[in-house]
């Protein structure tokens, strides 16, 4: 049981405090309710750009990294479709350093043309390196475009194209900051060896005077149900051909999420999972195969991806995958198979809660989706999934008309293409 206190400051900042006496450290996590789905379709990549800009200095702090490192800590951030998250981990006695740093950049970011220009170059270079120059690097551009036609998940977090970030002007940056990076659009979690009462006083000291903003109510288009099979083939200089089968599924906060998550584990989590054991180990049709979900706040995706073994046709490889998917639809899994994957999920959850940083991030996330107490019910929510629910979800999700197929066809000469090494997974 993760115990915590929840408070809301007068400016709307939501604050959660978790005391953990087993560690000398404290984690400070600031989650902003802004992700790439909130961007203008003509100005994508801004949430990711801001992740970089937030380290470019603020009103009283020219360099964000030096003070946290001098306090014996470290910091980082991540951005996705749904949120932007900043975190600091440092000795508990230096908690105030992290609160000072985070509050200063929330209050007044350094709007400097040189900083903007520098970070634009960094982000554009990252786009080129990870999306344009890396094999399969543009996969999410193709998947997003195939699967989504209305919802802003139709572009990846890094943005549709580098030009959107290259063309960003200072006024665009200021508007984005004051629209989204406000205390009433943020969640602050303090987790570690702290006294909640004292920690709250420090939070109020550093964040209480930051003015709230006028955050517009989110009105995103709803993605209509997919009722036809979609497919796309991309010819690219990749080492081997690759197959992606992409299915629409529920959101992270939908009751069916836990069954969908377990369904992906049945297919490809560990050496005894179905796709891995049957198609890679036994039939040797694939050199790599995986299944995972996006677990997004709005309806997301389940993806099966694989790279056929050298000499195996894409048609034969894909047919074998569909046979396994259809088996899940037509025949319920055994109770023992379900128990095994539930136990594995439970172990992963328990292990993740050892770290104060993970607890801070998870508390912030569940507060974002509406109920921080879910963090203490996750295990039981997985345990309550039934064999019948698994089959129902499989029937709803793994339909051909709910699928988008992406194929990478290698254009590399036979002598240059190198078959990837076979996966070597073992059950935990």
Image (cartoon, rainbow, N blue to C red):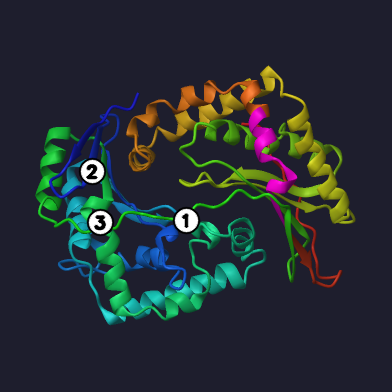
- Measured in 3D between alpha carbons, the distance from the residue under mark 1 to the one under mark 3, in whole angstroms, is 40 Å
- Please say if 398 is above or below 50: above
Q: Residues within 10 Å of mark 2 (few under 14, many from 20)?
A: many
> In the drawing, does residue 91 fall left or right of residue 275?
left
Residue extent of the magenta highlight: 392-406
Eyeballing the image, is 193 above or below 124? above
Secondary element type, mark 3:
helix
Residue on which the image places disc 3 = 68
**Mark in the foreground, 2 or 3:** 2
User: Which image quadrant is residue 115 in?
Assistant: bottom left
Characterize the local packing of mark 1: few (<14), some (14-19) or many (20 or more) Cα atoms within 10 angstroms: few
| Residue position marked by numbered label 1 in the rendering | 221
Q: Earlier in the sequence, mark 1 or mark 3?
A: 3
255 left or right of 315?
left
- Residues tagged 2 and 1 counted as in contact (Cβ below 8 A): no
| Residue 150 seen anywhere in this rendered image of the structure | yes
Q: Position of residue 302 (x, y in %)?
A: 62, 45
Whichever of callouts 2 and 1 sits on the residue coming sooner in the sequence is 2
- Residue with the mark numbered 2: 14
Helix, strand or loop under label 1: loop
Image quadrant assignment for residue 1 = top left
Residue 209 horizontal/vertical position (percent): 10, 54
Please check the rendered image and state whether residue 165 is part of the magenta-colored stretch, yes or no. Answer: no
Tell me what residue is drawn at x 74 percent, y 32 percent. 329
Q: Position of residue 415 (x, y in %)?
A: 86, 70
């Amino acid at each position: 049981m993760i115990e915590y206190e929840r408070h809301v400051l007068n400016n709307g900042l939501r604050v959660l405090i978790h005391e953990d006496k087993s560690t000398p450290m404290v984690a400070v996590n600031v989650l902003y309710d802004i992700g790439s789905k909130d961007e203008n379709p003509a100005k994508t990549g801004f949430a990711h750009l801001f992740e970089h800009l937030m380290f470019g200095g603020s009103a009283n702090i020219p360099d964000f990294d030096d003070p946290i490192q001098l306090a014996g800590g470290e910091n980082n951030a991540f951005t996705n479709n749904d949120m932007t998250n900043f975190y600091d981990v440092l000795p508990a006695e230096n908690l105030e350093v992290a609160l000072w740093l985070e509050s200063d950049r929330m209050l007044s970011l350094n709007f400097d043309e040189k900083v903007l220009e520098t970070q634009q170059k960094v982000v554009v270079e990252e786009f080129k390196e990870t999306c344009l120059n890396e094999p399969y690097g543009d996969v999410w551009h193709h998947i997003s475009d195939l699967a989504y036609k209305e919802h802003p998940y139709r572009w990846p977090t890094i943005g549709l194209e580098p030009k959107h970030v290259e063309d960003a002007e200072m006024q665009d940056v200021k508007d984005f900051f004051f629209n989204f990076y406000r205390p009433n659009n943020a969640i602050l979690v303090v987790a570690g060896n702290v006294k909640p009462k004292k920690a709250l006083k420090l939070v109020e000291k550093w964040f209480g005077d930051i003015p709230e903003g006028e955050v517009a109510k989110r009105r995103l288009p709803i993605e209509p149900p997919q009722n036809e099979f979609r497919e796309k083939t991309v010819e690219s200089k990749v080492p081997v051909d690759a197959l992606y089968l992409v299915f629409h599924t529920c959101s992270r906060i939908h009751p069916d999420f836990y069954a969908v998550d377990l369904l992906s584990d049945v297919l490809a989590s560990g050496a005894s999972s179905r796709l891995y054991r049957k198609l890679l180990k036994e039939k040797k049709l694939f050199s790599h195969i995986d299944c995972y979900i996006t677990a997004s706040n709005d309806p997301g995706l389940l993806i099966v991806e694989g790279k056929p073994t050298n000499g195996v046709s894409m048609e034969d490889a894909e047919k074998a995958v569909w046979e396994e998917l259809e088996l899940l639809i037509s025949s319920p899994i055994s109770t023992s198979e379900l128990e095994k994957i539930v136990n594995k999920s439970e172990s992963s959850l328990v292990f993740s809660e050892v770290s104060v940083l993970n607890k801070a991030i998870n508390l912030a996330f569940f507060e974002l989706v509406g109920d921080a107490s879910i963090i203490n019910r996750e295990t039981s929510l997985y345990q309550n999934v039934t064999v019948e629910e698994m089959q129902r979800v499989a029937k709803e999700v793994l339909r051909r008309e709910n699928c988008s197929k992406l194929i990478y066809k290698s254009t590399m000469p036979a002598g240059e293409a190198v078959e990837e090494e076979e996966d070597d997974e073992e059950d935990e």
